Image: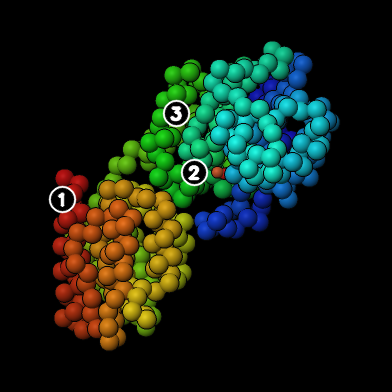
Amino acid sequence: MRAVIVSDHVTWVGAVDWNLRDFHGYDTPRGSTYNAYLVRGADKTALIDTVKTPFVPELLSRISEVLDPAGIDVIVVNHVEPDHNSGLRDVIAACPNARVVASVPGVRGVAEYHDGLVVEPVGADDVIDLGGVTLRFMGAPMVHWPDSMFTYCPEDDVLMCNDAFGQHLASAERFADEVGADLALEELKVYYANILMPLGAQIAKVMEKVSAAGWTSATVAPSHGVIWRGDIVAEALAAYERWGSGVLRDKVVVAYSTMWGSTDELARTVADSLIASGMDVELFDLAVSSIAHIMVEILDARGILVGSPTLHHGMLFRVAGFLQYMGGLRPAGRLGASFGSYGWSSGATKQIDDRLAEIGVDVVQDPYTQKFRPTAAELAAASEWAAAFAARVKAAGA
Ligand code: FEO
């Protein structure tokens, strides 16, 4: 795959990680990319972002289609997380004439990650003139880390925004309109739910600053996945606003694990009752489901029900793993409760309720528990329990 022209002065020279299947727990069946961009003026060339270490040869090979890497004058580090920054030293070795710049927290991050490597700080007051083509900078704290920064090329109206508007999507095409809007927006949503869900307020603040600065951003060029251009830019921006607004609906995610089928039977009964009560429902057996996909469904669900049988006095490990993962993403404003079967002593549902409360989920009713296989009467009771939960979810949204 060759370097790809993005605009008059901006060229994509990143790397495609076709085989990435796990991004610290977020399963990525479609792989990812580590995007990097060359910005060329009459006098100088800048490289915006680098890549994960194993992909440095691919990056340098693509840069070499455009110019000798030794001809690069500036390297901009928009973000120090290793997927973009671990290859920095190797890139610097190939670009010995480049000054390296980062946000103020980025300068500290580069030094900490790269054993004292010193780079220069840049911020909103700085402009790097490449010769008729300029680079401007804006701190984007917590989009995704404190060091995150956006770089903008006003002459081409291209916003290089690193993790923001990224997707874990490897493809032969470089633009959202080429892979298709539906696929690009779907992966944008998965990425938002699994990386950025707790950061909606910070994202909104940064996007307000982008707008106030007059960075109209006809092209939005993230560091993962495809690049947004044309009409689809507005769709991506609107999707971020929608997800960041925290608007929830009458929808319940039921996530559970089972040993011998009793908790599975309860889960299906609960789901049927929720549906009969007017809820939209998504049900997931954690043994066979992608947690990343569950998080996408939680994005707009007001209710979360978690089920587990009791094993060794506690919840099954898959349920604990799910709660830990979800806890990191801090879904706000959700109602929750737990259910499960047990053999001789219960304990799982109390653990689940405690963990849900720690995460910030409002546990609105006592758990539904039942010994061994559920009888017809117990299934009827579980159904009533779920209907009561649905009523609370509906009331909370009224
Ligand atoms: Fe793609 Fe926060 O790194």
Residue beneath the point at 50% across and 40% down: 144
| Quarter assignment of residue 353 | bottom left
Give percent across and percent down for residue 287: 45, 71
Q: Amino acid at mark 2?
A: Leu
Q: Give the number of marks.
A: 3
- Residue 235 vertical position relative to residue 254 in the rendered view, above or below: above
Q: Is 181 on the left or on the right of 334, as rendered?
A: right
Res 22 seen here: yes
| Quarter assignment of residue 338 | bottom left
Does dot 2 land on a helix, a strand or a loop? helix
Does dot 1 land on a helix, a strand or a loop? helix
Q: Which mark is residue 47?
A: none
| Quarter assignment of residue 256 | bottom left
Q: Earlier in the sequence, mark 1 or mark 3?
A: 3
Q: Is the shortest distance between ligand 1 and the CB of mark 1 under 8 Å?
A: no
List the residue tagged with mark 3. 207
Residue beneath the point at 60% across and 18% down: 126
Crowding near the residue tagged with mark 1, few <14, some 14–19, many ≥20 C-alpha atoms within 10 Å? few
Q: Residue furthest front?
A: 116
Placement of the C terminus among the 4 image quadrants: top left
Q: Are marks 2 and 3 in contact (CB under 8 Å)?
A: no
Q: Are marks 2 and 1 in contact (CB under 8 Å)?
A: no
Between circles 1 and 3, the one closer to the viewer is 3
Does dot 3 land on a helix, a strand or a loop? helix
Q: Amino acid at mark 3?
A: Met
* Residue closer to the observer: 145 or 222: 145
Q: Amino acid at mark 1?
A: Ala
Placement of the N terminus among the 4 image quadrants: top right
Distance of label 1 from label 3 (alpha carbons)? 33 Å
Crowding near the residue tagged with mark 3, few <14, some 14–19, many ≥20 C-alpha atoms within 10 Å? some
List the residue tagged with mark 1. 395
